[in-house]
């Protein structure tokens, strides 16, 4: 299955805007049944998927360069496959987050300034093999565990102020977010 999946490399197609390298990423999520559920359809808890960084401690969400031949949503989905080995559906744009990269400074971006478009992605498939599996492992965490494990403050902000707020608002009002389950029982464990 992995023979057709290859991680993109290089900067030939990289997008820049006003001195920022444009990045796309996502917070992959799923629902897991809680034990001892009391709702007839079962209680669910949301979990998010994080990956390790090959260059240091702490965990990350999949993200990478947004290239000229793809939409920002396509870039986020591609990064999820390449780095975390998951496929899914973009559900919500969470916002733009700015940060400085020490490893992605180049002639187009000497200061390493990046602007990341982050999305919530409902995971539909976990791949057994993926392009970066030799350098990355993946881990499902509660939102609290993920917030505590985030390597970068901007990713923690995307998780708490973007994903968690959206998830709370959508599960309170939108039964299509989690079809077929007791919406009042969907929770984020803090």
Image: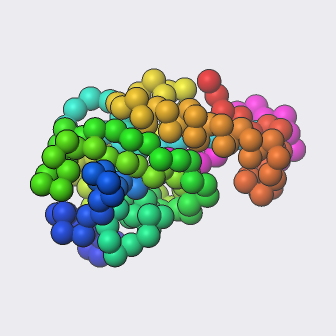
Q: In which quadrant is the C terminus drawn?
A: top right
Q: To which quarter of the image does residue 74 belong?
A: bottom left
Q: To which quarter of the image does residue 9 belong?
A: bottom left
Q: Is residue 50 left or right of residue 113?
A: right
Q: Residue at x 31, y 67 (%)?
A: 67
Placement of 60 over or under 94, stated as above or below: above
| Residue nearest the viewer, comparing 117 with 139 | 117
Asked if one can make out residue 150 in the rendered structure from this viewpoint, the answer is no
Q: Is residue 133 magenta?
A: no
Q: Is residue 40 magenta?
A: yes
Placement of 26 over or under 87, stated as above or below: above
Asked if one can make out residue 58 in the rendered structure from this viewpoint, the answer is yes
Image location (x, y in percent) of residue 27: 50, 47
Image location (x, y in percent) of residue 30: 59, 48
| Residue nearest the viewer, comparing 76 with 129 | 76
Placement of 150 over or under 3, stated as above or below: above
Q: Can you name the residue that lies furthest to the front here?
A: 18
| Residue nearest the viewer, comparing 172 with 107 | 107
Q: Residue at x 37, y 48 (%)?
A: 115
Q: Count of labels shown?
A: 0
Image location (x, y in percent) of residue 1: 34, 72
Q: Residue at x 74, y 52 (%)?
A: 178
Magenta-highlighted residues: 27-41
How was this image coloured? rainbow
Q: Residue at x 74, y 41 (%)?
A: 169
Image location (x, y in percent) of residue 36: 76, 31
Q: Can you name the residue that lies furthest to the right here?
A: 40
């Amino acid at each position: 299955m992995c023979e057709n999946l290859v991680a993109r490399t290089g900067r030939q197609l990289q997008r820049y805007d006003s001195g920022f390298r444009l990045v796309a990423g996502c917070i992959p999520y799923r629902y897991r049944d809680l034990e001892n559920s009391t709702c007839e359809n079962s209680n669910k808890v949301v979990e998010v998927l994080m990956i390790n960084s090959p260059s240091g401690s702490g965990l990350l969400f999949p993200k990478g360069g947004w290239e000229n031949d793809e939409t920002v949503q396509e870039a986020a989905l591609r990064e999820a496959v390449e780095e975390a080995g998951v496929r899914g559906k973009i559900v919500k744009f969470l916002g733009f987050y700015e940060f400085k990269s020490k490893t992605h400074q180049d002639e187009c971006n000497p200061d390493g300034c990046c602007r990341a478009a982050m999305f919530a992605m409902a995971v539909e498939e976990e791949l057994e093999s993926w392009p970066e599996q030799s350098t990355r492992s993946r881990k499902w965490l509660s939102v609290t565990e993920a917030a505590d494990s985030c390597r970068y403050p901007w990713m923690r902000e995307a998780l708490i102020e973007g994903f968690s707020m959206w998830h709370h608002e959508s599960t309170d009002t939108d039964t299509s977010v989690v079809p077929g389950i007791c919406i009042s029982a969907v929770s984020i464990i803090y």
